[in-house]
Image (cartoon, grey):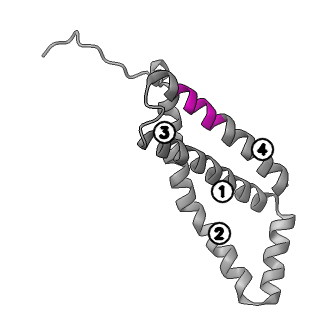
Amino acid sequence: MNKKRPVNLDLRTIKQPLPAITSILHRVTGVALFFGAVFMLYLLEMSLESQQSFDAAAAMMADSFFAKLIAWGLVSALLYHFFAGVKHLVMDMGHCEELESGRMAAKATLIASGVACLIAGVWIW
């Protein structure tokens, strides 16, 4: 066995390109949306039980910092997932597949989703 083969166990030295980071974030937000659906289904079930439970759900969303944080996180994940999905659809049609245009599309995805997340944060809070 060759003891001189390169071994890179330090994850801080691995540099991912920006399109790879946006693709990984697209997958992470998909998983977050899957698990966040539990919270949204709980709120939906709570709001459909009766008028009192609807008022309790509305009060929870209006008063609870944690509920607003979860809602903002889910909306932000949805917005990023949407913009990254549009980027992937554009790439599936044969556009932005080159190195430079792929970087520009990744930057546009991050900027558009960042602005949308800030607007959603202002709307929720």
Of mark 4 and mark 3, the one earlier in the sequence is 3
Residue farthest along the left direction in this orientation? 1
Task: Give the distance between the C-alpha atoms of the residues marked 4 and 1, in whole angstroms.
Answer: 13 Å
Provide residue 65's location: percent of width, then percent of height: 82, 58
Q: Nearer the viewer, mark 4 or mark 2?
A: 4
Which numbered disc, 2 or 3, marks the residue closer to the eye? 3
Which residue is denoted by mark 2 in the rendering?
A: 40
Disc 2 from disc 3: Cα separation: 25 Å
User: Which dot, 1 or 3, sits closer to the camera?
Assistant: 3
Q: Could you tell me how far apart the alpha carbons at marks 2 and 1 are, in whole angstroms?
A: 9 Å
Secondary structure of the residue carrying numbered label 2: helix
SS at badge 1: helix
**What is the spatial separation of the Cα atoms under label 4 and label 2, in whole angstroms?**
21 Å
Left or right: where 112 falls relative to 90: right
Q: Which mark is residue 65?
A: none
Say which residue label 4 marks. Answer: 118
* Three-letter amino acid code of the residue under disc 1: Leu
Q: Who comes first in sequence, dot 4 or dot 2?
A: 2
Q: Which residue is mark 1?
A: 74
Badge 4 vs badge 3, beta-carbon distance below 8 Å: no
Q: Amino acid at mark 2?
A: Met
Q: Is residue 55 above or below residue 125?
A: below
Q: Name the side, left or right, on which 40 lies relative to 60.
A: left
The quadrant the N terminus occupies is top left
Range covered by the magenta-colored residues: 103-110
* The stretch drawn in magenta includes residue 22: no
* Residue at left offset 49%, top offset 42%: 90
The residue carrying mark 3 is 23
* Amino acid at pointer 3: Ser
Return the x and y of residue 50 as percentages of the image width and height: 76, 90
